Structures are given as C-alpha cells and as structure tokens.
Amino acid sequence: MSYWAVASLALITALVLLLPFSVKRVEEELEVFLLLMGCAAMTVSGLWSWHIVKESLLEPLKISLAVLIAGYLFRSGRGRIEGFIERLEGRIGVKHSLFVLIVALAFLSSLLTAIIAALVLCEILYHLRLDRPSRVRTAVYACYAIGLGAALTPLGEPLSTIVTSRLQGPPHNAGFFWLAELLWLWVTPAILAVAALAAYWRPLGRADAAGQGGDLPPETHKELFLRASKVYVFVAALVYLGEGLSPVAEKLIPALKGWQLYWLGLTSAALDNATLAAAGIVPSMSRQQILSFTLSLLVSGGVLIPGNIPNIISAAKLGIKSREWAGAALPVGAALLLVYFLALGIIY
C-alpha cells in the first residue's frame, strides 16, 4: 500500500473521530457521514467488489429487522412492561430496580444478544420516566454493561462471535464457553461498577408529564421504520469502514507489542470493536494477549456511538447525540481502561 493511501486512511480515521463533535450537521446526520467515510475508505483501499457490496446490504438486515420487530412487540406489550417496572419499583425503589435490571440485562445479553438487551433497556428507561440527563447517562453506563456481558458467549455480539471463530483450532480450541472462562472474572466487577454508577452515583431526575421522559404516545409506524432505517445505514457504514481500513490494521497490528496493542484498541470507539477483533485476533497470540486486547476493545467500544451495536441502537431509539454520548462515556471508559491496564500489568 502506498504512503498516499496510508495517509488518506489515517485522515479518514481522524475525521470519523473528530467531526461528529465539532460539526453540528455531521452530528445530526451521523449515519450518512459514516457511510460517506466508509465509501471513501473502500475507494482509497481499492477494495470495492460485489462481495463487499452484498455484505453491506445483507449484514444490516438482521439487526434492523430485529429493531423493527422488537419495536412493534414493545409497542403492543407496553402495558405489561409498565406494570412490571412499576411493581419492581414499588418493592425495591427506582435506584435498586435500575441496578438489578442493568446487571440482569448485561448477563442475559450473552444469550439474548446485545441487540435485544439494548432494546429492552430503552423501553425500561422510557417507562422509568427519567429526565433527559439521567436517561442519557444511564443509557451510556448500561451499554457498557451490556457490551461487556454480551462478550461472554458467541451468541452475544459480533466481537465474541469473531473471536471464538478465530480461535476454534489449536492451540486454544475455543468452544462456546471459552470466552466466558477467560473474561468473567474481569468483566463481572466492571458490570457491577457501571450499574452502580447508573443507579446510585447521581440523583435520578424524573420528568414531569409535560417533559421529556414523561408519558409518551405510542410510536408511529413512520417512527419505527425510520429508526430501523437509521440502524441499517449505520451498520452498512461500519461494514465499509471496517473493510476499507483493514489493510492498515492487518499490517500494523502484528508489529505491535502487548501494551501498544492494548491502547490501539481505543480506535474501536469509532470503528466498531468487531472490526479490530477480526484484524487483530490470531491463534498464535497467547491467552494473556487475547485477554488484554479483548478487554481493550470491549471498553473502548463503549466510548463513542459507532463502537458497539448496543450504543447504535440506544442512541437511535433515545435520540442521543454524539457529544452527549461522549461526555458521559469518556470518563468511565478512561477509568476502566486504566484500571484494566494496571491490573493486567500486575497480574501478568
């Protein structure tokens, strides 16, 4: 690959990381912007093919259809959801209810998938009638928990599916519970910590009936289809971005040392952590290297909206903007990355 191509791909990466926070129009039309950047990356890399176009058309279908179907199911079952939340809140209070629900969703996401867990989370947050700052903050922390919990099995999210697939053969012989055995001692304290932050760290503001977060009318057909369409475009954009940037990742990652690989995971905040997992996880890596890189990807994937599927779904359904997400997510992500980095250094 030429120096011009490498420089161009680096520029595209920088634009993806910076423009959503500095240009309001980009923030408002994030899906279209990422799609344009993905097409630019594919063009610079010279990787356009019918196979990739087909993948970009088919890959988002299952996610957007899940979002659409779940939207209709939640709309029809709204009364039962509200009743369950009200009973739980009446017994243990709103803060304890939120903590229990986030922890439960985090661990169940490894079986239900992160997509379903994120959709259930959004319904919970609506029915708790939190004001906007509390809802945004809670959604961000809960998506960290879901992203971490979903990685415990290959069913949970694309990253765990890819890692398990790449390590099925010798020397790791990864089976269905291989990632659970590797990660559960590491992710469980983090899940409990972010759930506690969501529930207890700051007072949970409640919206009045006229404010955001109060009683909401049922979503219209147009709103349900529009949200599913936005998720579709978002995922298609990430397919192009991941494929277009893969030549640089495949050359760079094998040359990095352990600590460099760990901090490279930060780029998954904007490029989808499954993409870097596909480029960076190889059977020749040691168990410690796999653990370190995977933890970095999982935490970094929660920092920005494009980093993980739960983020994309929650931001689309709750109307969270890039700056709002990053403002709540960056401090937590930085703290988790530093704690994991120090713990890995001490233990290994």
Image (cartoon, grey):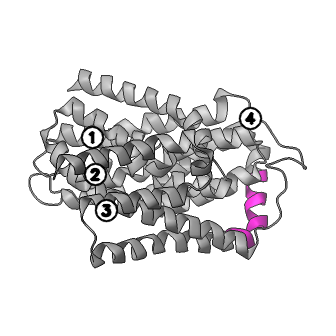
Q: Main secondary structure of the magenta part?
A: helix
Badge 1 is on which residue?
Answer: 293
Q: Looking at the image, is mark 3 or mark 4 earlier in the sequence?
A: 3
Q: Nearer the viewer, residue 183 or 69?
A: 69
Residue extent of the magenta highlight: 73-86
Q: Mark 2 or 4 closer to N-term? A: 4
- List x then y, in percent, for residue 320: 64, 48
Residue 168, picture quadrant: bottom left
Task: Confirm or deny contact between disc 1 and disc 4 (CB under 8 A).
Answer: no
Q: For the residue labelled by badge 1, is the local secondary structure a helix, a strand or a loop? A: helix
Q: CA distance from mark 2 to mark 3?
A: 19 Å
Residue holding disc 2: 277
The three-letter code of the residue at mark 4 reads Leu
Q: Nearer the viewer, residue 325 or 128?
A: 325
| Res 189 quadrant in image | top left
- Residue position for label 4: 204
| Labels 2, 3: front one | 3
Residue 42, numbered label: 3
Give the structural element (helix, strand or loop) at label 3. Answer: helix
State left or right for residue 112 relative to residue 67.
left
Of mark 1 and mark 4, the one earlier in the sequence is 4
N-terminal label among 1 and 3? 3
In the rendered structure, are the residues bearing label 1 and label 3 in contact, judged by CB atoms less than 8 Å apart?
A: no
- Decide which of tag 1 and tag 2 comes sooner along the chain: 2
CA gap, disc 1 and disc 2: 8 Å
Q: Nearer the viewer, mark 3 or mark 4?
A: 3
Q: Callout 2: helix, strand or loop?
A: helix
Vertically, is 113 above or below 282? below
Image location of residue 335, percent across then percent down: 45, 26
Q: Earlier in the sequence, mark 2 or mark 3?
A: 3
